[in-house]
Image: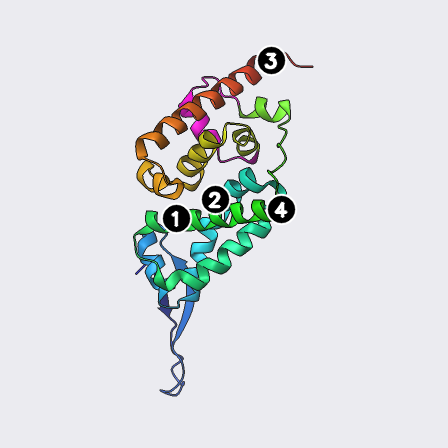
Amino acid sequence: MACSAFEAARPPDAPQSAPTAVLVPGCDMTDLAGVVAQAQRGDAEAFRALYRDTQPRLLRYLRALVGDDAEDVASETWLQISRDLASFHGDGDGFRGWAATIARHRALDHLRRNARRPPPILVPAEDLAGLAARDDTAATALDAVATDAAVALIATLPPDQAEAVLLRAVIGLDAATAATVLGKRPGAVRTAAYRGLRTLARHLEQARTRPPP
């Protein structure tokens, strides 16, 4: 089972009616589909495990879409996830894609309500220098995007490239699932992500070679 309950030892003098099992947090997140299934059956620990796994990814994605309002939009996202979880059908990757779709819709609703685009996120040069690796390629750029400074840098990319990179590298979706979230073809998402990562790598290279102040 993805999330298990362990039986506690019964004291020798305990009555037979005494409870013998307690829930101990322990979810195997390599079996995300199993955790999702248990959460759908009402397992609170499984739902908490889904939240701990997915929330940091969603927050980084949302920060690129709505800036400082990411926490509020994430809260709206989880309200809908908890309300509609029973109707979800799919595997672990499908769940992450479903959650990202909800987050994206809530972000777009938020932007429409406020009739604005999020303000540009300025990335200090020292943060970029800290991200730069000795051999900065698209691959090392991909490894770096989990940090907040890199996510801020991604937010400066063209919107289609930024979302493609965030969904592929931060949320962890494959091209087909990311394409479903964005309503595009998988090939278009792969191309946008590749271009975005190449641009990110160039920024990192420039930061690495920039002389110190």
Q: Secondary structure at mark 4?
A: helix
Circle 2 is placed at which residue position?
57
Q: Secondary structure at mark 2?
A: helix
Count of numbered circles on the image: 4
Q: Secondary structure at mark 1?
A: helix
Asked if 181 appears above or below 13 in the picture, the reply is: above
For the magenta stretch, what is the residue range?
132-148
Circle 1 is placed at which residue position?
96
Circle 3 is placed at which residue position?
210
Q: Residue at x 47, y 21 (%)?
A: 199
What distance separates the C-alpha of mark 1 from that of mark 4? Answer: 27 Å
- Mark sitting earlier along the chain (1/4): 1
Q: Residue at x 60, y 38 (%)?
A: 118
Instruction: Give the amino acid at mark 1.
Output: Arg
Instruction: Give the amino acid at mark 2.
Output: Arg
Disc ID at residue 114:
4
Instruction: Give the amino acid at mark 4.
Output: Asn
- Is 146 included in the stretch rendered in magenta? yes
Q: Are marks 2 and 1 in contact (CB under 8 Å)?
A: yes
